[in-house]
Image: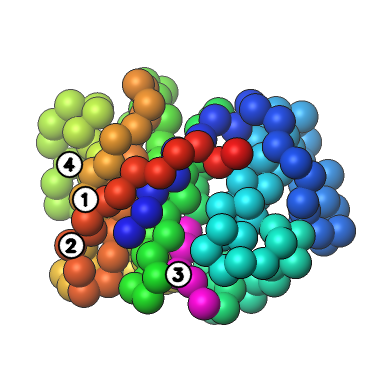
């Protein structure tokens, strides 16, 4: 399984569809619009390497809870503040999450609210608990409030300073291969 980490403040070739451009335009803050657009342009650029289709020609469908899919590849995207992360697997459903570790978030309370029992530890540790849970949920394309089954396995991944990140696979322990940035 491949993991791509990339900065969202770097300009990218514009390969968004008209629908994606319209969605980006609805963001209230310019930084949010730019980060969302750059994350989705990066997603298209990366997936095009795997499916051998020009980035602008990739078509997505959405699962019942909004998880995007495209034919021939399993993938997932996450972004937080100025960093993005994409996981790609050829045949196994995958989820990824990256979060900025923030002092103003009562992460222990959020973890309890979603049914996590591991709510003790440093703030950094608890953010990793959160990213593992979210990556597991995203691998299934299910709601965050549903506790994923034990056969969805998550592992922490290398993230920029001040961030926590995890990736998950269904029925497999993730073996991560870090790839370059999303050019």
| Residue 66 on the magenta segment | no
**Pointer 2 with pointer 3, Cβ within 8 A:** no
Secondary structure beneath label 3: strand
Q: Which residues are magenta?
A: 72-76
**Residue 146 picture quarter:** bottom left
Q: Is residue 69 left or right of residue 163?
A: right
- Seen from the viewer's position, the closer of residues 38 and 128 is 38
Q: Residues within 10 Å of mark 2 (few under 14, many from 20)?
A: some
Residue highlighted by disc 4: 119
Whole-angstrom CA distance, mark 3 to mark 4, is 31 Å
Q: Nearer the viewer, residue 144 or 154?
A: 154
Which labelled disc corresponds to residue 74?
A: 3
What is the magenta segment's predominant secondary structure?
Answer: strand
Residue at 58% x, 73% y is 70
Q: Which mark is residue 155?
A: 1
Q: Identify which residue is drawn at 21% across, 74% down.
A: 171
Mark 1 touching mark 2, by CB under 8 A? yes
Pinpoint residue 111: horizontal percent, then vertical percent: 28, 47
Q: Comparing marks 1 and 3, which lies closer to the viewer?
A: 3
Q: Are marks 3 and 4 in contact (CB under 8 Å)?
A: no
Residue matched to label 2: 173
Disc 1 to disc 4: CB gap under 8 Å: no
Q: Within 10 angstroms of label 3, few (less than 14), some, or many (20 or more) residues? A: many
Kindly state the secondary structure of the residue where label 4 is placed.
Answer: loop
Residue 24 shows in this picture: yes
């Amino acid at each position: 399984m491949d993991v791509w980490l990339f900065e969202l403040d770097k300009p990218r070739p514009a390969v968004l569809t008209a629908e994606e451009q319209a969605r980006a335009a609805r963001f209230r803050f310019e930084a949010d619009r730019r980060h969302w657009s750059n994350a989705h342009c990066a997603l298209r650029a990366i997936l095009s390497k795997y499916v051998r289709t020009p980035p602008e020609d990739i078509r997505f469908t959405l699962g019942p809870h909004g998880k995007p899919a495209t034919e021939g590849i399993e993938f997932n995207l996450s972004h937080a503040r100025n960093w993005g992360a994409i996981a790609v697997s050829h045949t196994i459903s995958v989820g990824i999450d990256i979060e900025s570790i923030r002092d103003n978030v009562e992460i222990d309370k959020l973890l309890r609210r979603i049914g996590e029992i591991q709510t003790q530890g440093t703030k950094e540790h608890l953010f990793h608990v959160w990213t593992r849970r979210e990556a597991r949920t995203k691998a299934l394309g299910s709601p965050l409030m549903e506790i994923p089954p034990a056969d969805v396995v998550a592992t922490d991944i290398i993230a920029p300073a001040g961030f926590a990140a995890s990736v998950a696979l269904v029925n497999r322990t993730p073996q991560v291969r870090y790839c370059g940035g999303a050019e």
